């Protein structure tokens, strides 16, 4: 199965629309002109930290600050919100879409470049566009792998080594020879000198780049093919570490302010003079802006045009045909995105219903699978799925619901949710009985008040032991909160007490949870110190997120749980550890490099569902409003400690797209049949204590795992609901780790 990206897949449909609007020769039947600009030159000063460049107010960039800035527009709050490395960052600058790729330049962008858009829409020859890469890991920028675009619409590129002077000289030559209309040039020296650790030479290279850029602008003004019809865009791909972070300006590649904060300056006949763009914006906004200036559509872009900085002039009104064309692209993309999740969900549900009900038991794994089936069935209004869960419940209840371990109580939550779907009181009554069983502390309780799991005998180790596990929180807290909602009493108080008690046993100094600890054992030598297993942390976080959703109608309890969510470090610690792939590692402490599909699916589902509830609760309509962005109450867990200055809108939307990025990386684990592979039954080995897949080579030999199937379906329901709730979003803010 090919690795998909939702946006990339969306543009497959858009690519079809392109073909419908072209003549047999491949030329567009129209060339819309809205602005005076006929040429766009983008110059990227690689690896320039904001505070050393534009943020120094001309200290090292005197020409850009004193000569270009007053006659153009500045974007001092531009950010790179994903991989702050060269190859993916530059790919974002030429595609207008967030890219997830290694920093070696061997993986081409998954969405079309601006050169492909331009050449295909206008039937333009190769010499109209070009790339001056400047770096060895930027050879991938001239075309994408996207179907219908690609090499037939590539941009010529010139391998000139790593010198700024060589790049500037070649650009001056091209102005007089091939006269390209769309150029992307990289000045590499600032970054390479920065890595040397010599700050004086680093700042000198900034000044030299500034001098070259000023000369390039002068050449444009003295060339009749470019004068008064060329827009120059100056930017950078990423910054460098904030001082005090790792080795400071010497390196880059994380989510600190110094790495994320970029800049942009734009000057040209359609750019407002002396305009300072006040809003936060992103480097993926550059390509849509280029598209608007030159008149080509960019349907796969995650960014939006920086229109506020442009003069509102209509040299020629956009033809109705062009308007209809762009509208059709947007409509097709939107429809595809909205239907994509539902299609995957239907396929997974159909596959799930083929699993014999008789094969299901009452373990936590079975319960997570059944929750997923029920979530999908309710969302899709599929009575077959609801009847499937009813069949299991009726059979299980007839056997008096055996309870072999405290985590089996999650089946009680399935019964509560089945009651919500069917209004059949027998399910709520039996679920309440399980809640009472939990309250009876069936296997005992620790000195700190945490419920104990059933004693485990390990003959090979010649030991018996009783554990306190993070799994317990997810098994009992939603169940008890559901009982509270329906029957009242002290269920919620006991549930929240369990979170606090387990935290005392399991949370480390950062707020992350260990998966379990030994409460008592027959051997003093048996003392396992497990990793910060991501699934255990997903269970812990998911338990309190679910609690807030269930008790939402009780204002006092909802406020209490919401405060717990926003003040606890657990959510921030988990979000901070999201990798550039969009996924979370199996061991959040970083000791294990594999990924647990179940945990990733659970995090996607729980965070998306919680965020959707917060949004609808604060607006009443499921649409963003100023009320969503109250500074005193965080709108999202995705506001990291080093991101307190992030725009309110991007904080909200960022949470959504953190989840989309994770889902894009997990999607290949769904087989064509609709079953989730790549998960295995737990390997009870203290050294290999995880189940995982290893991207980008996805391991299928681990087989099918019911818990993963259920978690995937629940995640899709939550994510699809959130996307529908938010509607079209202009800014995609993806995972930034």
Image: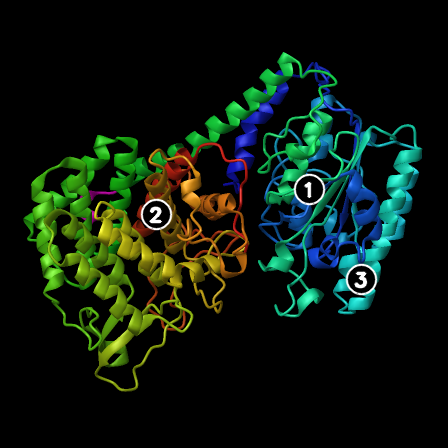
Whether pointer 1 and pointer 2 mark residues with C-beta atoms closer than 8 Å, the reply is: no
Q: Is residue 189 magenta?
A: no
Name the side, left or right, on which 657 lies relative to 226: left
Q: CA distance from mark 1 to mark 2?
A: 36 Å
Is label 3 in a helix, a strand or a loop? helix
Label placed on residue 203: 3
Quarter the C terminus occupies: bottom right
Disc nearest the viewer among 1 and 2: 1
> Would residue 547 be visible to someone looking at this image?
yes
| Residue placed under numbered mark 2 in the picture | 610
| 245 or 353, nearer to the observer | 245
Q: Is residue 358 magenta?
A: yes
Whether pointer 1 and pointer 3 mark residues with C-beta atoms closer than 8 Å, the reply is: no
Mark 2 or 3, nearer chain start: 3
Give the image location of residue 473, x and y in percent.
26, 61
Mark 1 or 2, nearer chain start: 1
Residue at the far bottom in the pictured view = 524
**Quadrant of the image occupied by residue 8:** top right
Is residue 172 placed above or below 493 in the rendered structure?
above
Label 3, residues with CA under 10 Å away: few <14, some 14-19, many ≥20: many
- Coloured how? rainbow
Disc nearest the viewer among 1 and 3: 1
Label placed on residue 573: none
| Residue placed under numbered mark 1 in the picture | 276
Label 1, residues with CA under 10 Å away: few <14, some 14-19, many ≥20: some
Is label 1 in a helix, a strand or a loop? strand
Q: CA distance from mark 2 to mark 3?
A: 46 Å
Name the side, left or right, on which 219 lies relative to 466: right
- Image: magenta residue range: 355-360
């Amino acid at each position: 199965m090919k690795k998909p990206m939702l946006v990339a897949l969306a543009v497959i449909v858009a690519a079809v629309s392109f073909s419908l609007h072209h003549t047999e020769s491949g030329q567009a039947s129209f060339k819309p002109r809205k602005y005076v600009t006929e040429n766009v030159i983008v110059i990227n000063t690689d690896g320039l930290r904001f505070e050393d460049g534009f943020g120094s107010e001309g200290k090292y960039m005197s020409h850009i600050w004193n000569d270009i800035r007053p006659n153009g527009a500045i974007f001092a709050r531009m950010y790179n919100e994903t991989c702050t490395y060269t190859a993916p960052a530059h790919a974002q600058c030429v595609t207008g879409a967030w890219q997830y790729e290694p920093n070696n330049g061997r993986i081409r962008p998954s969405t079309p470049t601006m050169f492909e858009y331009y050449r295909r829409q206008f039937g333009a020859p190769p010499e109209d566009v070009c790339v001056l890469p400047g770096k060895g890991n930027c050879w991938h920028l001239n075309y994408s792998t996207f179907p219908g675009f690609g090499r037939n619409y590539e941009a010529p590129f010139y391998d000139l080594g790593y010198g700024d002077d060589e790049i500037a000289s070649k650009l001056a030559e091209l102005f007089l020879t091939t006269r390209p209309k769309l150029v992307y040039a990289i000045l590499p020296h600032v970054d390479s000198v920065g890595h040397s650790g010599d700050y004086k030479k680093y700042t000198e290279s900034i000044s030299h780049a500034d001098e070259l850029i000023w000369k390039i602008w002068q050449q444009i003004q003295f060339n009749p093919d470019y004068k008064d019809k060329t827009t120059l865009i100056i930017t950078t791909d990423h910054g460098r570490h904030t001082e005090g972070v790792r080795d400071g300006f010497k390196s880059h590649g994380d989510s600190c302010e110094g790495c994320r904060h970029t800049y942009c300056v734009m000057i040209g006949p359609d750019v407002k003079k002396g305009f300072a763009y006040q809003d936060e914006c992103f480097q993926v906004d550059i390509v849509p802006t280029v598209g608007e200036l030159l008149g080509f559509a960019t349907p796969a872009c995650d960014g939006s045009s920086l229109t506020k900085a442009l003069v509102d002039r209509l040299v020629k009104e956009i033809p109705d045909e062009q308007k209809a064309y762009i509208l059709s692209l947007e409509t097709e993309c939107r429809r595809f995105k909205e239907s994509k999740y539902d299609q995957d969900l239907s396929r997974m549900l159909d596959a799930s219903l083929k699993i014999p009900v008789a094969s299901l038991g009452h373990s936590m794994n079975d319960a997570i699978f059944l929750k997923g089936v029920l979530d999908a069935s309710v969302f899709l209004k599929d009575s077959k799925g609801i009847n499937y869960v009813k069949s299991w419940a009726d059979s299980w209840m007839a056997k008096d619901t055996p309870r072999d371990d405290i985590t089996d109580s999650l089946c009680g939550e399935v019964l509560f949710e089945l009651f919500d779907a069917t209004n059949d009181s027998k399910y709520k009554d039996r679920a309440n009985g399980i809640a009472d069983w939990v309250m009876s502390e069936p296997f005992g309780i620790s000195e700190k008040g945490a419920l104990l799991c059933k004693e485990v005998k390990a003959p090979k180790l010649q030991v018996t032991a009783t554990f306190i596990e993070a799994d317990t929180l997810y098994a009992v807290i939603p169940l008890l909160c559901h009982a509270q909602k329906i029957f009242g009493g002290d269920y919620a108080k006991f549930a929240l007490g369990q979170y606090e008690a387990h935290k005392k046993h399991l949370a480390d100094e950062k707020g992350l949870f260990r998966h379990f600890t030994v409460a008592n054992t027959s051997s003093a030598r048996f003392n396992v110190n497990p990793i910060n297993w991501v699934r255990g942390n997903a269970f812990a976080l998911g338990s309190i997120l679910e609690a807030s959703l269930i008790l939402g109608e009780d204002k006092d309890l909802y406020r209490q749980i919401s405060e717990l969510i926003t003040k606890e470090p657990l959510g921030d610690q988990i979000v901070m550890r999201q990798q550039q792939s969009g996924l979370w590692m199996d061991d959040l402490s970083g000791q294990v490099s594999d990924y647990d599909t179940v945990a990733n699916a659970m995090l996607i589902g729980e965070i998306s569902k919680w965020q959707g509830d917060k949004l609808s609760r604060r607006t009443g309509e499921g649409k963003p409003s100023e009320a969503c962005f109250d500074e005193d109450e965080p709108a999202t867990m995705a506001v990291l400690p080093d991101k307190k200055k992030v725009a309110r809108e991007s904080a909200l939307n960022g949470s959504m797209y953190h989840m989309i990025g994770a889902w894009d990386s997990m999607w290949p684990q769904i087989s064509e049949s609709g079953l989730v592979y790549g998960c295995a039954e737990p390997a009870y080995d203290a050294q290999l204590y995880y189940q995982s897949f290893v991207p980008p080579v996805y391991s299928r030999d681990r087989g099918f795992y019911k818990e993963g199937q259920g978690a995937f379906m629940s995640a899709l329901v939550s994510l699809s609901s959130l996307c529908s709730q938010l509607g079209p979003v202009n800014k995609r803010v993806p995972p930034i780790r």
